[in-house]
Image (spheres, grey):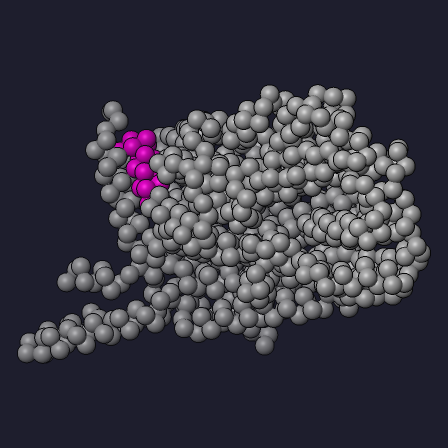
């Protein structure tokens, strides 16, 4: 028997009927990505970070008081005054502060020294995010304070080296603009989970056996299922796109057609992976647990969503690129913010196509064995 | 009381029997958390490093080469491209090959040593990824300030920085991001396993039609829920314990606080998940919907947990909303007890909050349970009653026998009916 599109269509019709029969499932596949994206996007405020500080002024001179009071009035910091290292340690253990500033005695005189006046900062080392933020803000504060002082005393020549930094794409790109496109792959893993379960459900309720006796070939069956779920999920792209561009005002500088095609490929790859999982196990419960392990935690940690992938580590780079999301995160960011064309991002697109082909192929191969 | 315990116990035995029958599932639930923790922690533990850097060196002097070498040596940056001009470097960035471009202008070396003037370099960062952008920017600035300091120390001119800050990190001297990542992983993995098992407990029975069988046994609804919760709790605790063991043995992250306290405080965290999961399983029509609910909820909780965005950086509204997230409170406890050696006196606030969330989730599940084990039972009953009334009014003139038949057909659903849209099927038949 040859592959016949007519039989694929009949499977397609059957799948659509399945999806449409449960209006709630349909709405969840349509709207849950957009809904989750809204909720996630609200997390990213446009403003910069706020640092909770404890200050121990050991010096108590006019100079040290100027340093601390300026710190206190700075909007980036909120200051608690303490006395002694034990108090600082208690606050650090209770996680009430991100960092503690200790001004040693002799600070007021040492500012006139060529070596500079030392100030110690104790960071909360556990939350490296907050620690990094505190470091940056305090360094910035110290240099403006220093600049003001040197003007006051007309101390010195300009610093020998200055750095001008510039954003490559837009001066007002903020956290939100960079994170929302990267979250799109994550929210689109939801429909893939639904597809994985659709297959095991047929196995569990034994309707797959009745399909085996029909003339439908495995490939036609899989094709119908993939097309049905990919197309259903793809309609959900519209609300997601609207949420990103209209609600949150993320710039969309690339080609919409390329973006839709990339999303379809990504969905196909995810569904292929999901179907592969579905083939390996017999119960929906197991399929769900495995799918959650593969899509959920790695989606956050491995796909380059937060920490960029370190290409010098070969193993982790390899594993990350097995996940379809990794390629799609790169593509989404490039299309939205960079306005990348197909020519710019072709390596990621080829990677995504390859991964999609591999997972769908694996899904088809393992599926054949099961029905024969 | 003894009877109740006995009935709960029999449900627990049944659940464990069912779980142990599915060998793949059991293996996955027990071993996959360890595997995933080990893999993820190994791959993502370090801080951001080796961002690809392009350099446009228009000066080509000894000083500029020193600057480039210094940038390359920093942990965050890795020199990959020498570009002829800025356009070429920008094209590499557009292709995603480099994350930052440093432009050294001509005459850099001379300006650098001239005390009357300052040399300037330009750094262009890829703002499509803000982590790359901020890391690259601060790394270049650090290298520049080091160079400035070395120079001023050499020439013994008065430094432009009267205040010099030295940083020390408490609890984690190297500012390694691994303890932070590992605790987040631990919480997320326990979370996903317990939530998904709880969320499928009732939907699975309903889909297989075994819920009806359970309903005709003397086991009450609450006993059923408690009996189903206990195996999930046990699995969650096993997961937490084995993963903490793995963290101590393999990753050598010290446990500074009390381990029993940590396990004790894991119980409300798992109970919260059981509450939410049971609620999901009571409102879902089938496992597909349950999974969609779980996944959506899991993403929201993790997002609110302060892992994706530090809690202090969230907008005020979201800071309040995120108090509902049990993951957030558990992470505070976990990091406090495990990494900072906090006692119960330091973590009582998140403990109370966590217990509150757990109780609220349980209460919601309890309320939903009172509406019946059948999904949408209330709505379906109302719909059936409404249609009955309509048909009655429409067919008032017809013979009584017929309307009585109509009535029996549209009788309200029994509480333990399966979920399959009975109303629609009936309409099709008639």
Nearest to the observer: residue B351 or residue A239 = A239
Q: Which residues are magenta?
A: A216-232
Residue B137 in view, yes or no: yes
Q: Is residue A62 left or right of residue B35?
A: right
Nearest to the observer: residue B97 or residue B408 = B97
Magenta: main secondary structure: helix
Q: Position of residue A148 (x, y in %)?
A: 78, 53
Q: Is residue B310 magenta?
A: no
Q: Position of residue A367 (x, y in %)?
A: 39, 33
Q: In which quadrant of the rendered view does residue B406 lie?
A: bottom left
Q: Position of residue A117 (x, y in %)?
A: 88, 50
Nearest to the observer: residue B224 or residue A237 = A237
Q: Residue at x 54, y 26 (%)?
A: B87
Q: Residue at x 73, y 33 (%)?
A: B119
Q: In which quadrant of the rendered view does residue B195 lie?
A: bottom right
Q: Position of residue B9 (x, y in %)?
A: 57, 65
């Amino acid at each position: 028997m040859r592959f016949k599109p007519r039989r694929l269509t009949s499977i397609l019709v059957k799948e659509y009927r399945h999806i449409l029969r449960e209006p709630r499932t349909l709405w969840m596949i349509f709207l849950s990505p957009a809904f989750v994206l809204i909720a996630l996007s609200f997390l990213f405020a446009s403003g910069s970070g706020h640092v909770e500080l404890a200050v121990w002024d050991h010096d108590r001179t006019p100079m040290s008081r100027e340093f601390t009071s300026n710190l206190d009035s700075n909007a980036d910091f909120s200051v608690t005054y303490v006395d002694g290292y034990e108090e600082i340690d208690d606050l650090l253990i209770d996680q009430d502060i991100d960092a503690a500033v200790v001004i040693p005695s002799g600070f007021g005189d040492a500012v006139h020294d060529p070596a500079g006046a030392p100030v110690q900062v104790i960071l909360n080392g556990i939350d490296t995010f907050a620690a990094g933020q505190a470091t940056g803000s305090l360094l910035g504060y110290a240099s403006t304070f220093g600049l003001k002082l040197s003007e006051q005393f007309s101390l010195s020549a300009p610093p020998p080296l200055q750095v001008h930094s510039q954003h490559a794409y837009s001066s007002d790109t903020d956290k939100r603009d960079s994170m929302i496109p990267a979250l799109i792959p994550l929210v689109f893993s939801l429909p893939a989970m639904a597809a994985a379960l659709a297959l095991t459900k047929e196995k569990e309720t034994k309707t797959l056996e009745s399909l085996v006796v029909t003339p439908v070939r495995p490939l036609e069956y899989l094709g119908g299922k993939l097309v049905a779920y990919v197309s259903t999920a793809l309609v959900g792209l519209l609300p997601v796109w609207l949420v990103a561009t209209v609600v949150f005002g993320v710039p969309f500088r690339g080609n919409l057609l390329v973006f839709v095609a990339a999303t379809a490929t990504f969905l196909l790859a995810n569904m292929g992976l999901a179907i592969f999982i579905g083939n390996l196990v017999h119960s929906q419960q197991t399929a769900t647990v495995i799918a959650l392990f593969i899509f959920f935690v790695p989606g956050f940690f491995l796909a380059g969503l937060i920490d960029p992938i370190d290409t010098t580590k070969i193993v982790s780079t390899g594993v990350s690129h097995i996940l379809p999301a990794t390629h799609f995160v790169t593509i989404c960011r490039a299309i939205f913010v960079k306005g990348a064309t197909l020519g710019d991002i072709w390596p990621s697109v080829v990677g995504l196509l390859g991964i999609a082909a591999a997972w769908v192929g694996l899904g088809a191969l393992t599926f054949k064995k099961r029905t024969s | 009381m003894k009877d109740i315990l006995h009935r709960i116990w029999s449900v627990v035995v049944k659940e464990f029997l069912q779980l142990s029958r599915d060998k793949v599932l059991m293996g996955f639930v027990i071993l996959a958390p360890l595997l995933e923790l080990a893999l993820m922690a190994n791959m993502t533990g370090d801080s951001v490093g080796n961002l690809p850097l392009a350099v446009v060196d228009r000066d080509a002097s000894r000083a500029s080469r020193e600057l480039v070498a210094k940038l390359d040596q920093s942990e965050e940056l890795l020199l990959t491209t020498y570009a002829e001009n800025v356009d070429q470097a920008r094209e590499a960035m557009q292709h995603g090959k480099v994350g930052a471009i440093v432009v050294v202008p001509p005459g850099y070396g001379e300006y650098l040593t001239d005390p009357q003037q300052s040399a300037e370099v330009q750094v262009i960062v890829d703002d499509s990824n803000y982590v790359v952008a901020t890391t690259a920017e601060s790394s270049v600035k650090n290298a520049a300030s080091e160079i400035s300091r070395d120079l001023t120390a050499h020439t013994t001119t008065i430094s432009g920085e009267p205040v010099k800050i030295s940083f020390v990190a408490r609890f984690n001297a190297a500012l390694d991001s691994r303890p932070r990542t590992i605790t987040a992983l631990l919480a997320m993995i326990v979370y996903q396993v317990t939530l998904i098992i709880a969320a499928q407990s009732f939907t699975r029975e309903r889909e297989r039609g075994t819920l009806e069988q359970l309903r005709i046994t003397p086991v009450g609804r609450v006993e059923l829920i408690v009996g189903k919760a206990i195996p999930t709790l046990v699995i969650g605790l096993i997961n937490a314990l084995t993963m903490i063991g793995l963290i101590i043995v393999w990753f050598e992250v010290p446990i500074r606080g009390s381990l029993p306290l940590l396990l004790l405080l894991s119980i409300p965290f798992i109970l919260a998940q059981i509450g939410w999961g049971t609620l999901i399983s009571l409102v879902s029509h089938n496992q597909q919907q349950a999974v969609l609910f779980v996944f959506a909820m899991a993403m929201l909780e993790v997002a609110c947990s302060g892992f994706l965005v530090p809690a202090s950086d969230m907008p005020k509204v979201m800071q309040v909303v995120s108090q509902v997230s049990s993951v957030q409170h558990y992470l505070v406890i976990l990091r406090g007890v495990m990494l900072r050696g906090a006692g119960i006196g330091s973590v009582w606030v998140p403990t109370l909050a966590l217990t509150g969330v757990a109780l609220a989730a349980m209460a919601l599940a309890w309320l939903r349970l009172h509406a019946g084990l059948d999904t949408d039972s209330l709505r379906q009953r109302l719909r059936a009653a409404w249609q009955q009334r309509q048909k009655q009014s429409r067919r008032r003139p017809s013979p009584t026998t017929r309307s009585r038949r109509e009535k029996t057909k549209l009788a309200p659903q029994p509480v333990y009916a399966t979920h399959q849209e009975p109303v629609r099927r009936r309409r099709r038949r008639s």
